[in-house]
Image (cartoon, grey):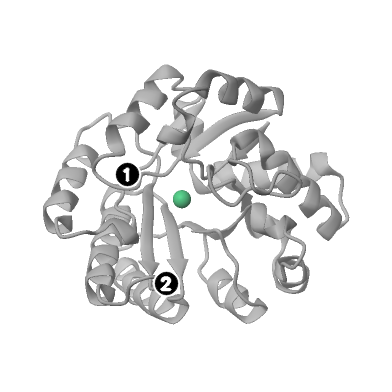
Amino acid sequence: MIIDTHSHLYGEEFLADISDVINRARAAGLGKIFLPNINAASIEPMLALTRRDPDFFYPMIGLHPEDLGTTWREVLPQMEALLQQPEHPFIAIGEVGLDYYWDRSLNEEQQEAFAIQVGWAQKYGLPLMIHTRDAHRELVNILKQQIVHCKLSNCTLSGVFHCFGGTAEEAVELLEFEGFMLGIGGVVTFKKSHLPDVLKAAVPLERIVVETDSPYLTPVPYRGKRNESAYLVEVLRKLSQIYEKDIEEVASITTSNALKTFPKSQIIAV
Ligand code: NI
């Protein structure tokens, strides 16, 4: 069984042919797909997809750093109210984080929103799905502060640094956060990617989970097309070359990493 730990299959890109997309994913060997939330509007489509197949789809809750808009102070309490329901379906807080790529005017608000949502991970005992772009240093600093708070109150933090694309030094720094994995997707298959060398030099397979980030970041040989979870096999194939292991072994190790990092995805599963 393989697990796509980050896929936005509830998006409108998939409305027309979601049944085929699911069938292709199952045929490719996928056993579970984790769905990171984006904003207030994506919650209902995400939950609707989950209801369709609750042993296959596992939703998360969180506000994406690029989706703060002007209403995030109202949206966050609405999201937290969902977490307070006793049998809520969410397996993680995500995707949350910092993205300074397009717009730096909201840096401080992004940091504030991120810190609040890291607080949810502690309070509700869930892992984090972290998105970060052009904000490595700030992210590490916030997380370090939160972990100090967390240790004082005897909790632990865990999760995934989604779509890791940094340097070997950054990888080493992120892996110092115990209980965190690097999310590796289609970028590792790109011809000019430095990621294979970085992984080889600094990242053990035991710290990797695989993801597609569908519909984005489509792996070779499908670049230019819409990404979908079935293409996760191309990421596994590339990792098997990088780590010089059978694709089955790579699948088995990364799946066990994912189940360990998202324990609630094991409990709900039948
Ligand atoms: Ni995403």
In this view of the protein, which residue sits in the foreground, 110 or 156? 110
In this view of the protein, which residue sits in the foreground, 174 or 86? 174
Name the amino acid type tagged 2.
Tyr
Q: How far from the left and from the top, in percent, is residue 110?
A: 27, 68
Task: Specify the label residue 61 is tagged with.
Answer: 1
Q: With 65 as the anchor, is 184 left or right in this view? A: right
Q: Does residue 270 appear in the picture of this structure?
A: no
Between label 1 and label 2, give the one nearer the viewer.
Answer: 2
Q: Is residue 232 above or below residue 132?
A: above
For label 2, the SS is loop
Which quadrant holds residue 99? bottom left
Which quadrant holds residue 4? top right
Q: Does residue 36 appear in the picture of this structure?
A: yes
Q: Is residue 141 above or below residue 45?
A: below
In this view of the protein, which residue sits in the foreground, 230 or 203? 230
Q: With 133 as the anchor, is 107 left or right in this view? A: left
Please report whichever mark, 1 or 2, sits nearer to the chain's N-terminal start. Answer: 1
Name the amino acid type tagged 1.
Ile
Q: How far from the left and from the top, in percent, is residue 207?
A: 64, 59
